[in-house]
Image: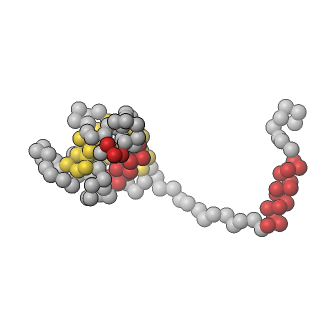
Amino acid sequence: MSDETGTGRRAATAGAPGATGAAAEAGEVITVPASHQGYPGIAFGGYVAGLLAARAAAATVRVDFRAATPVDTPLRVAEPGDGGSQLMDGSGAVFATATPVPDLAVSAAPDAPSWDQAAAAAAAFRTAGPTGLAAD
């Protein structure tokens, strides 16, 4: 985090040491530097998503963009109380939200078929012809 803003909130430059990887302080102010822009004057969406995800209390979030996020502009990170985070300007306009989503159970990958099974499946695919046509 960098110096005080005079508003009782700490300011951080996005990407600066200590600016990511922690829960957002109440009203934390961040600035996305122009070096992280996608379109001219607009922050790269993946970078903004990472900033919000890193500051959310939830382990897994979905980031939705409400408006283009400007670069070199102080923006406030807020915690809406649901475990997510929001990025907004001083007027309260929301640029992006990180909403908690349930963790998905990931099962193990299936076993690969043997060479003979794969060759038989490929041969059956080549000889089966298309399905779902009007003549079927």
Residue 63: percent from left, percent from top: 41, 44
- Quarter of the image with the N terminus is bottom left
Left or right relative to 122: residue 45: left
- Residue in the image at 22% along x and 35% along y: 90
Q: Is residue 98 visible?
A: no
Q: How many marks?
A: 0
62 and 47: which one is in front?
A: 47
Please identify the quarter of the rendering in which residue 132 is found: top right
Task: Quarter of the image for the C terminus: give it.
Answer: top right
Q: Is residue 118 above or below residue 39?
A: below
Q: Residue at x 59, y 62 (%)?
A: 107
Q: State whether residue 39 is above or below residue 11.
A: above
Q: How is the image coloured?
A: secondary structure
Give the percent coordinates (x, y) of residue 23.
Answer: 29, 55
Q: Residue at position x 28%, y 38% from top?
A: 88
| For residue 79, side relative to residue 37 (left or right) | left
Left or right: 55 as drawn, with respect to 64: left
Q: Does residue 113 lie above or below 44 as drawn?
A: below
Which x, y percent locates residue 69? Answer: 34, 37
Which percent across, then down, holds residue 113?
75, 65
**Quadrant in the rendering for residue 18:** bottom left
As drawn, which residue projects farthest toward the left?
A: 6
Residue 36 in the image: above or below residue 103: above
